[in-house]
């Protein structure tokens, strides 16, 4: 079993938590993620990372002697399905809801968690989920939002690559369109206009027309705001069309699933990432080692680290609240301050536990920090 990763993990066994609500022998939490449909591979990434943390906490005696029990639900990355799933989860009387991970799904369901007074911890990254916009005391984000990620891309394009004619390829979901809005704002701050915007529908297998339109517009770099399958299509066809401009994308474009789909075509692609598997930080080293040992040498991939950290955030919140009652937990979540694989985990004014993001370039074998 892994060495202790976090301060929160130590506190799980060192301190008592008082009488917990939600009676029973376990602390029941829900994981809502896509295991089928759009982005289905993300559900597996999330569950693997989360399972390692759950097993670690439970092996140390759980929380006040109660072990964490995770009940998993498939939302198919579909907002309508997510709505039905969240209703079922609430009826199951869980302590915390992890997910959904798709921004458009969260936008459609987070008020249900608010009405039920159940904290919802998500990896979805749309800036539209910030507390300043949702005003939901029960909604928290486990990784950096796309305001931070897209701003990092724009800064890199302008200051490092010196490009002045960006072209954008974006999808139709809130995850994609909200990122485009951030890019437009940040480029404008630098006196730069996006020369062309082209959209791809989720599930489309051909984006050559859009890429040629961007080329005709004179773009000097491609910035991608799509989900993983469309990222793979775009990168592959950029290489096939021999369009020789830098390719940059946000978190979906840096996923292992995209690397596995496009193979050699990925070399040279830049991405804004939220997890560095090559970090020498003890918590990251331990997490990567355990993940590889369990899953046939496979390293963790974004957003696994977010939900992994989320278990330790919960443990610390329960320590602070001395309860698993929803309102008490929601209040305690605003006071959590622990170290995780993403660094310091502390909710900001917009309920984001992390703002960690960095630019990296795929060198043919790994993501190298830029």
Image (spheres, rainbow, N blue to C red):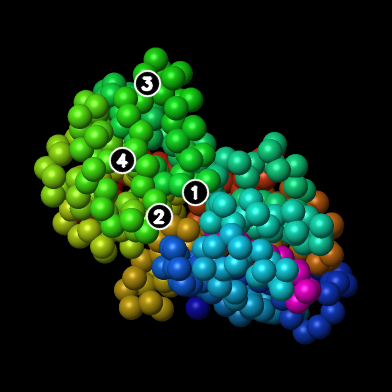
Residue topped by disc 2: 202
Q: Is residue 13 left or right of residue 150?
A: right
Q: Label 3 crowding class (10 Å Cα cut-off): few <14, some 14-19, many 20+?
A: some
| Whether residue 28 is situated above or below residue 46 in the rendered picture | below
3 vs 4, front mark: 3
Residue topped by disc 3: 193
- Residue at (46%, 47%) from the top-left corner? 172
Q: Are marks 2 and 1 in contact (CB under 8 Å)?
A: yes
User: Is-magenta flag for residue 96?
Assistant: yes
| Residue 323 x, y percent position in the rendering | 84, 65
N-terminal label among 4 and 2: 2
Return the residue found at the far front: 209
In the picture, the disc for residue 248 is 4
3 vs 2, front mark: 2
Return the residue found at the far top: 191
- Residue at (24%, 35%) from the top-left corner? 213
- Residue at (57%, 52%) from the top-left corner? 104
Residue topped by disc 1: 173
Q: Is residue 165 left or right of residue 143?
A: left
| Count of numbered labels shown in the rendering | 4
Q: Is residue 204 left or right of residue 357?
A: left
N-terminal label among 1 and 3: 1
């Amino acid at each position: 079993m892994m060495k202790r990763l976090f301060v929160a993990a130590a506190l799980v066994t060192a301190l008592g938590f008082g009488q917990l609500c939600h009676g029973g022998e376990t602390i029941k939490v829900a994981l809502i993620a896509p295991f089928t449909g759009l982005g289905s591979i993300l559900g597996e990434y999330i569950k693997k990372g989360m399972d390692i943390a759950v097993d670690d906490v439970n092996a140390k005696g759980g929380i006040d002697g109660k072990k964490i029990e995770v009940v998993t639900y498939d939302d198919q990355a579909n907002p309508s399905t997510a709505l039905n799933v969240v209703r079922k989860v609430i009826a199951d009387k869980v302590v915390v809801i992890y997910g959904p991970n798709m921004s458009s799904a969260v936008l459609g369901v987070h008020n249900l968690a608010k009405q039920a007074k159940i904290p919802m911890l998500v990896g979805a990254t749309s800036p539209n989920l910030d507390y300043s916009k949702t005003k939901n005391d029960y909604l928290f984000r486990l990784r950096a939002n796309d305001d931070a990620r897209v701003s990092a891309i724009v800064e890199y394009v302008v200051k490092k690559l010196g490009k002045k004619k960006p072209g954008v390829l974006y999808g139709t979901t809130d995850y994609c369109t909200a990122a485009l809005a951030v890019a437009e704002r940040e480029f404008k701050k630098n006196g730069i206009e996006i020369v062309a915007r082209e959209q791809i529908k989720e599930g489309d297998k051909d984006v050559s027309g859009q890429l040629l339109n961007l080329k005709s517009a004179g773009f000097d770099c491609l910035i991608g705001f799509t989900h993983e399958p469309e990222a793979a299509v775009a990168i592959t066809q950029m290489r096939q069309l021999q369009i020789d401009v830098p390719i940059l994308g946000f978190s979906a474009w840096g996923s292992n699933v995209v690397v596995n789909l496009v193979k050699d075509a990925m070399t040279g692609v830049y991405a804004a990432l939220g997890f560095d598997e090559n970090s020498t930080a003890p918590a990251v080293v331990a997490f990567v080692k355990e993940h590889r040992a369990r899953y046939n040498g496979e390293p963790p991939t974004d957003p696994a680290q977010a939900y992994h950290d989320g278990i330790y955030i919960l443990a610390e919140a329960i320590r602070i609240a001395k309860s698993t009652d929803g309102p008490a937990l929601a209040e305690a979540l605003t006071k959590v301050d622990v170290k995780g694989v993403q660094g310091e985990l502390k909710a900001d004014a917009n309920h984001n536990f992390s703002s960690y993001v960095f630019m990296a370039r795929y060198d043919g074998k790994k993501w190298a920090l830029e």
